Image: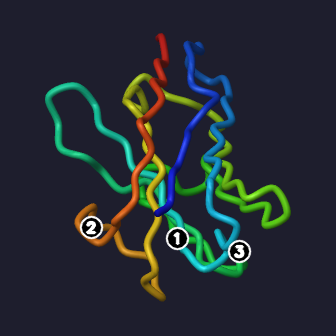
C-alpha cells in the first residue's frame, strides 16, 4: 500500500511561486510513476503533469507548460511540483497520485494511490 502526503500549498499573489511536495511511505517509490492533478471548486479533476519512474521524462498539461516543473528525488522518496508565474486560474486543490503504469496518463482513474490534497490559492 502506498500512502502519499502533499505539502507546500498556501496563498500567493499572481505572478508568485509555490513548491509542492509529495512524500511517499513506500520504500520502492521509484516503481511508481507520479502525477499531479488539481481540482478547482465546482470543476472536474484536471491533469497537471506527471513524471516517469526514472525521473527523466515529464509530461505537462498545456495550461501549465513553461510555468510548472516536476522533479523527483529518489533518495528522499519525494516528487516536487514547482509552480512559477502563478495565475488566479491555478487556484485549486492539488493532488499527487501514483500508479504502476509505464506511461504517464492524464486520466485520474489510471491512478490507484492518491494523497489528501493541498490547497493552492492565487490572488489577483
Residue 63, compared with residue 15, is above or below; it is below
Nearest the viewer among 74 and 86 is 74
Q: Residue at x 44, y 38 (%)?
A: 94
Circle 2 is placed at which residue position? 107
Q: Residue 55: which numbered mark, if any?
A: 3
- Name the residue furthest left: 42
Q: Residues within 10 Å of mark 1 (few under 14, many from 20)?
A: some
Q: Position of residue 111 (x, y in %)?
A: 34, 66
- Name the residue furthest bottom: 102
Circle 1 is placed at which residue position? 59
> Dividing the picture into quarters, in which one does residue 106 lie?
bottom left
Q: Position of residue 100 (x, y in %)?
A: 46, 80
Left or right: where does residue 31 sit relative to residue 76? Answer: left
Q: Position of residue 56 (x, y in %)?
A: 72, 79
Q: Position of residue 53 (x, y in %)?
A: 63, 79
Residue 40, compared with residue 78, is above or below; it is above
Q: Residue at x 48, y 50 (%)?
A: 96
Left or right: where does residue 32 sit relative to residue 42? Answer: right
Q: Secondary structure at mark 2?
A: loop
Nearest the viewer among 84 and 76 is 76
Q: Residues within 10 Å of mark 3 (few under 14, many from 20)?
A: some
Residue 105, compared with residue 78, is above or below; it is below
Q: Secondary structure at mark 1?
A: strand
Gap in angstroms between the C-alphas marked 2 and 1: 13 Å
Amino acid at each position: 500500500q502506498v500512502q502519499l502526503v502533499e505539502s507546500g500549498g498556501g496563498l500567493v499573489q499572481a505572478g508568485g511561486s509555490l513548491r509542492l511536495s509529495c512524500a511517499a511511505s513506500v520504500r520502492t517509490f521509484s516503481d511508481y510513476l507520479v502525477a499531479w492533478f488539481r481540482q478547482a471548486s465546482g470543476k472536474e479533476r484536471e491533469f497537471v503533469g506527471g513524471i516517469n519512474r526514472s525521473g527523466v521524462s515529464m509530461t505537462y498539461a498545456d495550461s501549465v507548460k513553461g510555468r510548472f516543473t516536476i522533479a523527483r528525488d529518489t533518495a528522499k522518496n519525494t516528487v516536487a511540483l514547482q509552480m512559477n508565474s502563478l495565475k488566479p486560474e491555478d487556484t485549486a486543490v492539488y493532488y499527487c497520485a501514483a500508479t504502476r503504469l509505464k506511461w504517464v496518463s492524464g486520466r485520474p482513474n489510471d491512478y490507484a494511490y492518491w494523497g489528501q490534497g493541498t490547497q493552492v490559492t492565487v490572488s489577483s
